[in-house]
Image: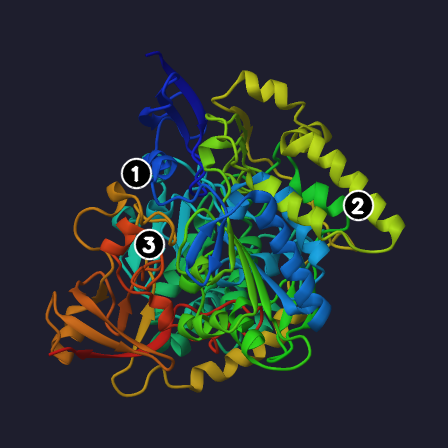
């Protein structure tokens, strides 16, 4: 036995922590997974999820061969048969019903896999369907919308420079549980601690007193869905009461009548709805402007609500007008070794909005994708363009999207379905064919997206630890082989496609990555990164504006028309009742030992007390006669379910919380560990009709529910 050490990046969440894996090079057995103290970015930190890489690698439930659904059950088949039947099925559906009859859904793990990011678009282009969906519209779509309309590129997302800020305002985010989201920040606990050590301050504004709130200087409760009113009131104080303290805007920014658009939102007018007193709003505004540097960071709780698009735009506006934009300690942009923003912009891929609309509800696309909240109706509603077949890649929409019981009925009605997934899970059980890729330790890794969202400029490449066993394909190989089998167009086009794909197949993702590295300004290539497997620190974030504006006129517009139109709808918000009768507002929550829906088959991550509970405030529990530990029936407009109550003052009165990603209690899945701790699916309760009207992002937070104690 010879024990070797392999350095790599943990690819399970956005933090990109460096890890050291000790393994037996004879047997392939993993001895341990620990944090890599030589990684300049994560500095030895890892969270409990990293150890799940070993569990995932060894999981007996992970599929190793393609599966075909037959009358007698699932049957293992060859790759040749599986790929041919998948392509033939899609061709058959499109020949009969048109190209848009095949829909696709991409899950979040795709952005953790640069091979999928390179080869996935080739497959979707060959399918040629407008019915494309992804986890983006149940997550970060409001961020992309603001970036497109303000900075000219949907991926040009500002990052909080938390390593140098003096005042961090966190709205609807819990980085101590998420390790940072759209803010790649490994070792987040010590990064937050450093703010205090240099005399800075942290304020968390959230309907729940989260783990991050526990280390903050202050925590303010806010009613779900009312963040837009708080942000408008802060803008009111900035532009009406503290105008003399506002710094001059840079020349490249087009200012507008900010004071006029926020005039109705005097703090006294919004306090009753937000739950935050007018004096608090004024104190926050003053402290924001007095701080040496400050930055507001809004994440999931702000995005997945009815006014998520307006919230993310207003957060950008407040960071800009307070003088905390594109400077140390404020909201900044990365200069990554692989400049995915610059590369895609050069290819005309800055992003677009409302080029076409969904067939049934007439909702706009963004970046070539429709809001996933319309997926079920696009399958269930007859007519031209009806989705008859689905392709899912590394996604589990039957747990991750709103009104999942309706979506289950929709998937049951499909004529054909293919899932690229290494588990037989809640979604892939509906497929006719499951095409399983190799595990994450059997492929190389580079963080194209998360390096572009990091709080420092870093670069790191990880070679594969293990070679895939014979008969196992990598994700990109599956996608490329399907693409080849769907080659369409005239003879010349098909020949060009074959040549292009042959070159890319020869280069492999590694070769394409090397070309992207060489096109950047870091001076790095793949050989340089291979020599430093612990990663390379390229320095702190630097000012890049206005050179990194991708708008056509090279100017930053603070008030794009699309936001002014949406803002008109908020005026009536002040006149509407928050709740009726005994309704409460449902929100989600995240735990550091969980990652969406697909790590619940790891025993070490789910052991202990059940985390899938309904959390509610003691005052609400007493009023409704609900005791801690009893079963509660939770009802929304679309469904009801039963879940165990957890009475806690972490929740503000009038708010309840169920974590996302559970509900492994459906028949036909092969997730033995997850089934033992099944929990309930909170997205049974969320409403496909409740959306951010501006972006189409699902409003998973702020869903009205009622509770009844179960006798």
Q: Position of residue 123 (x, y in %)?
A: 67, 51
User: Is 630 placed left or right of 276 in the picture?
Assistant: left
What colouring does the structure picture have?
rainbow
Q: Quadrant of the C terminus?
A: bottom left
Q: Which element carries disc 2, helix, strand or loop? A: helix
User: Is 298 placed left or right of 209 in the picture?
Assistant: right
Which circle, 3 or 1, is nearer the viewer?
1
User: Is 705 placed left or right of 574 in the picture?
Assistant: left
Which numbered marker is on residue 497? 2
Q: Position of residue 402 (x, y in %)?
A: 44, 70
Which residue sits at x=50%, y=24%? 535
Which residue sits at x=55%, y=16%? 531
Q: Is residue 460 above or below residue 382?
A: above
The crowd level at tag 2 (other Cα within 10 Å; few <14, some 14-19, many 20+) is some
Disc on the earlier residue, 1 or 2: 1
For disc 3, the marked residue is: 590
Real-space Cα separation, disc 1 to disc 2, in angstroms? 44 Å
Q: Is residue 52 above or below residue 120?
A: above
Q: Position of residue 180 (x, y in %)?
A: 42, 45
Viewer-side residue, 191 vs 679: 679
Disc on the earlier residue, 2 or 3: 2
Real-space Cα separation, disc 2 to disc 3, in angstroms? 43 Å
Viewer-side residue, 149 vs 50: 50
For disc 1, the marked residue is: 48
Real-space Cα separation, disc 3 to disc 1, in angstroms? 14 Å
**Residue, far front:** 72
Viewer-side residue, 386 vs 589: 386
């Amino acid at each position: 036995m010879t024990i070797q050490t392999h350095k790599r990046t943990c690819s399970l969440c956005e933090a990109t922590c460096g890890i050291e894996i000790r393994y037996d090079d004879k047997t392939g057995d993993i001895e341990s997974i620990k944090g890599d103290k030589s990684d300049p970015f994560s500095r030895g930190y890892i969270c409990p999820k990293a150890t799940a890489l070993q569990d995932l690698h060894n999981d007996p439930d992970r599929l190793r061969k393609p599966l075909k659904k037959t009358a007698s059950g699932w049957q293992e088949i060859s790759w040749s048969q599986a790929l041919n039947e998948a392509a033939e099925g899609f061709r058959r559906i499109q020949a009969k019903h048109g190209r848009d009859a095949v829909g696709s859904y991409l899950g979040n793990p795709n952005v953790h896999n640069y091979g999928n990011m390179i080869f996935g678009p080739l497959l979707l282009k060959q399918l040629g369907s407008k019915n494309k969906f992804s986890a983006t519209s149940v997550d970060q779509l409001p961020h992309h919308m603001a970036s497109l309309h303000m900075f000219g590129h949907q991926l040009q997302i500002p990052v909080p420079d938390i390593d140098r800020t003096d005042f961090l305002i966190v709205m609807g985010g819990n980085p101590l549980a998420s390790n940072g989201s759209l803010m790649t920040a490994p070792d987040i606990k010590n990064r937050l601690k450093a703010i205090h050590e240099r005399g800075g301050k942290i304020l968390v504004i959230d309907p729940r007193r989260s783990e991050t709130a526990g280390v903050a200087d202050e925590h303010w409760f806010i009613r779900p869905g009312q963040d837009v009113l708080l942000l408008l009131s802060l803008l009111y104080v900035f532009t009406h009461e503290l105008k003399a303290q506002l710094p001059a805007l840079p020349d490249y920014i087009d200012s507008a009548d900010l004071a006029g658009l926020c005039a109705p939102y005097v703090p006294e007018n919004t306090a009753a709805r937000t739950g935050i007193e007018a004096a608090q709003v004024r104190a926050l505004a003053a402290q924001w402007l007095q701080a040496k540097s400050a930055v507001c960071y809004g994440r999931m709780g702000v995005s997945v609500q009815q006014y998520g698009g307006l919230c993310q735009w207003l957060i950008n506006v407040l960071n800009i007008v307070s003088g905390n934009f594109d400077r140390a300690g404020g909201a900044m942009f990365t200069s990554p070794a692989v400049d995915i923003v610059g590369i895609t912009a050069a290819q005309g891929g800055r992003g677009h909005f409302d080029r076409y609309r969904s067939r049934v509800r007439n909702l706009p696309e963004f970046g070539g994708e429709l809001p996933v909240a319309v997926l079920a109706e696009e399958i269930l509603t007859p007519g031209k363009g009806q989705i008859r077949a689905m392709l899912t890649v590394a996604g589990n929409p039957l747990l991750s999207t709103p009104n999942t019981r309706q979506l289950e009925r929709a998937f049951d009605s499909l004529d054909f379905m293919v899932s690229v997934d290494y588990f037989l899970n809640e979604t892939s059980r509906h497929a006719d064919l499951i095409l399983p890729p190799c595990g994450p330790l059997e492929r190389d890794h580079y963080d194209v997206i998360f390096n572009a969202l990091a709080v420092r400029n870093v670069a790191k490449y990880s070679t594969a630890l293990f070679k895939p066993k014979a008969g196992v394909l990598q994700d990109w190989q599956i996608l490329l082989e399907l693409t080849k089998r769907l080659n369409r167009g005239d003879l010349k086009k098909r020949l060009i496609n074959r040549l292009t794909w042959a070159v890319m197949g020869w280069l492999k993702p590694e070769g394409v990555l090397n070309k992207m590295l060489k096109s950047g300004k870091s001076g790095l290539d793949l050989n340089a990164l291979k020599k430093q497997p612990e990663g390379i620190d390229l320095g702190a974030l630097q000012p890049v504006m206005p050179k990194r504006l991708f708008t056509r006129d090279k100017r930053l517009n603070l008030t794009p028309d699309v936001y002014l139109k949406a803002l008109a709808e908020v005026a009536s918000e002040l006149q509407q009742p928050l709740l009726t009768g005994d309704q409460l507002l449902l929100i989600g929550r995240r735990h550091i030992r969980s990652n969406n829906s697909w790590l619940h088959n790891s025993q070490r991550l789910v052991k202990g007390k059940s985390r899938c509970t309904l959390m509610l405030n003691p005052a609400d529990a007493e009023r409704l006669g609900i005791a801690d530990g009893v079963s509660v029936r939770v009802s929304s407009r679309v469904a009801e379910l039963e879940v165990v109550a957890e009475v806690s003052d972490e929740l503000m009165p009038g708010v309840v919380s169920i974590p996302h990603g559970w509900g492994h209690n459906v028949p036909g899945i092969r997730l033995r560990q997850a089934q033992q701790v099944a929990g309930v699916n909170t997205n049974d309760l969320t409403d496909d009709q409740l959306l951010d009207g501006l972006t189409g992002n699902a409003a998973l937070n702020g869903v009205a529910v009622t509770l009844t104690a179960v006798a």
